[in-house]
Image: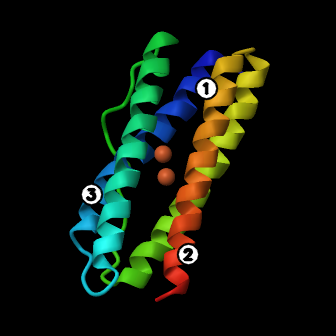
Amino acid sequence: MTKENLIRGWNEDLAAELGTVIRYTYQAFRCYGLLAAELRELLATEAQDELGHAAFLMDVIQDLGGEPTTTPKPFDKPADLKGMLGLDVKLEAEDVANYLAHAKLTEQLELPELKLKLEEMAADEAGHGREWRRLLKGI
Ligand SMILES: [Fe+2]
Ligand SMILES: [Fe+2]
């Protein structure tokens, strides 16, 4: 494991975060019906969390000598609410897995602060996923 591999992995995480900020902002304005008010608020709040994650990754990538990506990862646009939330549950779970994997990699490079922060971000994503699953059950 090298620093370069870790930076490559973090740039993939960063692209996913930038995609999620755009996806949640986009989805917030695709919500209609009874759930729309609650959902819009949640999506807006979570988009802010994801922006914070993206900012952290940009900071550490630059700090370790890398060039942070500014290209968001593309995402699907399901037409209905169920499809939308299902996609969000799936992508949040992927983010959890990626952050936990990258947290393990930081152990080999002895970057304890980054390990803790990545685990905290994995926990944030797990919380987001739980929120979407809870809403999905009610649809
Ligand atoms: Fe995130
Ligand atoms: Fe998230």
Amino acid type shown at disc 3:
Thr
Determine the image quadrant of residue 36.
Answer: bottom left
Q: Please indicate whether residue 122 sits to the left or right of residue 128 in the image.
A: right
Q: Residues within 10 Å of mark 1 (few under 14, many from 20)?
A: some
Measured in 3D between alpha carbons, the distance from the residue under mark 1 to the one under mark 3, in whole angstroms, is 28 Å
Residue under the image location 29 percent in, 53 percent down: 22
Q: Earlier in the sequence, mark 2 or mark 1?
A: 1
Determine the image quadrant of residue 101.
Answer: top right
Measured in 3D between alpha carbons, the distance from the residue under mark 2 to the one under mark 1, in whole angstroms, is 33 Å
Q: Is residue 116 above or below residue 132?
A: above
Could you say which is closer to the camera, residue 106 or residue 34?
34
Residue 52: image location, x then y, percent:
41, 36
Q: Secondary structure at mark 3?
A: helix
Q: Is residue 47 above or below residue 26?
A: above
Q: From the viewer's perspective, is the residue at label 2 or at label 1 nearer?
A: 2
Mark linked to residue 6: 1
Amino acid type shown at disc 2:
Arg
Q: Is residue 76 above or below residue 123?
A: below
Q: Earlier in the sequence, mark 1 or mark 3?
A: 1
Mark linked to residue 96: none
Residue under the image location 63 percent in, 23 percent down: 114
Mark linked to residue 25: 3
Mark linked to residue 134: 2
